[in-house]
Amino acid sequence: MINRFTSDRSAYHVGDNAQLTAVFANGSGVLQPDDVPVQSGQPVTIDGLTQTIRYKLVVTSGGQSVSRELDLNVSYRERMRAIDMPFARAEHAAATLRDGRVIIFGGEDNGSVFPNSVWVFDPGTERFSQIGELATGRVGFVSVTLFDGDVLVAGGLRALTGSPGAELIDGDTGVSSPLPNAPQRERVFAAASLLLNGTVLISGGLRGAIPDNTVEIYDPANDTFTLLPGSLQVARAEHTSVRINERRVLIYGGYTVDGQPAPPELYDPVAATSTLLPAAESGARARHVAHTMIDGGVLILGGLDADDQPMSSILRFDPASSTFSPFASMATPRASFGVGRLVDSRLLLPGGTHSIAGAGTDTTEIVGVDGGRRDGPVMTRPRFLHTVTPLRSGKVLIVGGLDEARRAVAGAEVFE
């Protein structure tokens, strides 16, 4: 018989711990879904709640079982909290290591040379520490986390002449090693996608000051870069690349050679061919964000138009029909920002430039899977060209960026 099955609080926030206490007579108790053994009257601690969950207590005695259920309601505090950061960084990249720590690498600080230091954020202590160095500082590069957890870093403007064109960051240690082979093309502001076979598709980018249309594949099995025979139909840079399936990669937006809008393309990495799609909008879009939703649809968010004005529109690409449709509109136009998916599938949109003058904003917005939006909490400072990284706890880490004076920010914050 179960006398009582209770929690220590009526509601929790993302990242909180919960204590559950069961009081029952006779038999043995188990908590589902985790099959945690329970002793009558002894509290059980549930660490790091990320979302609302239902626990079921099952007490078995003499081959007979009784049960009782308990809902733990978990929600976000919907606030920003500043995190000390002992270095400045903007236009960098962030990647999650296998153990959940987050590395920060590349980009610019406020010095005269691109920094090569690699820093790591420990979500447990909420502290940053230096973990290693890149072979060279770089900006305008691509970075992709591979299926084994290692991180490919390739291309960009490099601080050292003759330095490696690409390197690989170990997903366990955060230590970077130069790759023996260089990319086939020197690219800045290219785009890259991890394919289902574990290789990486790299497309477009600037070669010198000219947008490029070539496409190459990085194969981690032998650390080689291979130029594909089929190019993009429109040369472009500062575009986005999103894998749809093994035969389709969506290429969207970017700056072109003649300044005309770049129509979307679907690139087939198996056949090395690209198919132009009907234009989703009349104007240009670059420095936007592309995000794959839970249902497989792809959102195209914000960016700069042909006049370098930040945009507020959000489009949705439907993979089934290969068509675009309006999805939502942001209250604040944004470019050079990031997107973080929350555990409840909503999207957090923090910061970015919001005017043609390139001024950053401290505002945030939250967009739901149905396209509904509302204002989010104000950040501790304006920032753009920052990174936004969801943590395993369900919180979201926001690092660096440029401030309103276009200086690299030495500060981070957490949405919780």
Image (tube, grey):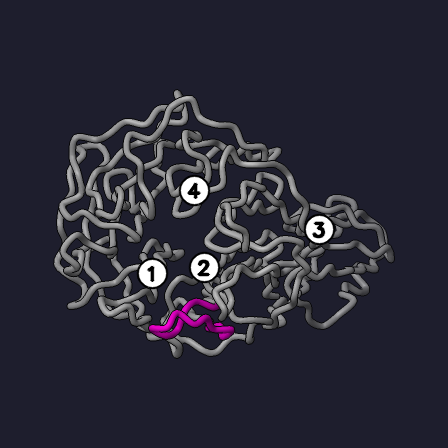
In x, y percent, where is residue 63?
Answer: 73, 44
Position of 121 relative to 307 (above/below): above
Say which of 410 and 1 sits in front.
Answer: 410
Foreground disc of the pair 3, 4: 4
Indicate yes or no whether the magenta region holds residue 243: no
Give the extent of the magenta segment.
351-365
Task: Name which of mark 1 and mark 2 comes first in the sequence.
Answer: 1
Q: Is residue 294 left or right of residue 118?
A: left
Q: Earlier in the sequence, mark 3 or mark 1?
A: 3
Q: CA distance from mark 4 to mark 2?
A: 15 Å
Label 3 – label 2 distance at C-alpha: 26 Å
Find disc 1 in the rendering and name its residue: 288
Residue bearing mark 2: 385
Q: Position of residue 95 (x, y in %)?
A: 52, 45
Give the residue at mark 3.
124
Q: Is residue 354 magenta?
A: yes
Tell me, for residue 224, which label it has, or none.
none
Q: Residue at (39%, 47%) from the top-left corner?
A: 140
Q: Residue at the location (87% across, 57% down)?
A: 41
Residue 368 in the image: state x and y as whole percent.
42, 69
For mark 1, give the secondary structure. loop
- Work out how far the residue at label 1 is from the one at label 4, CA to CA, in angstroms: 17 Å
Q: Amino acid at mark 4?
A: Ser
* Residue toward you, 26 or 382: 382
User: Which of the two labelled residues, at mark 1 and mark 4, occupies the earlier sequence position?
Assistant: 4
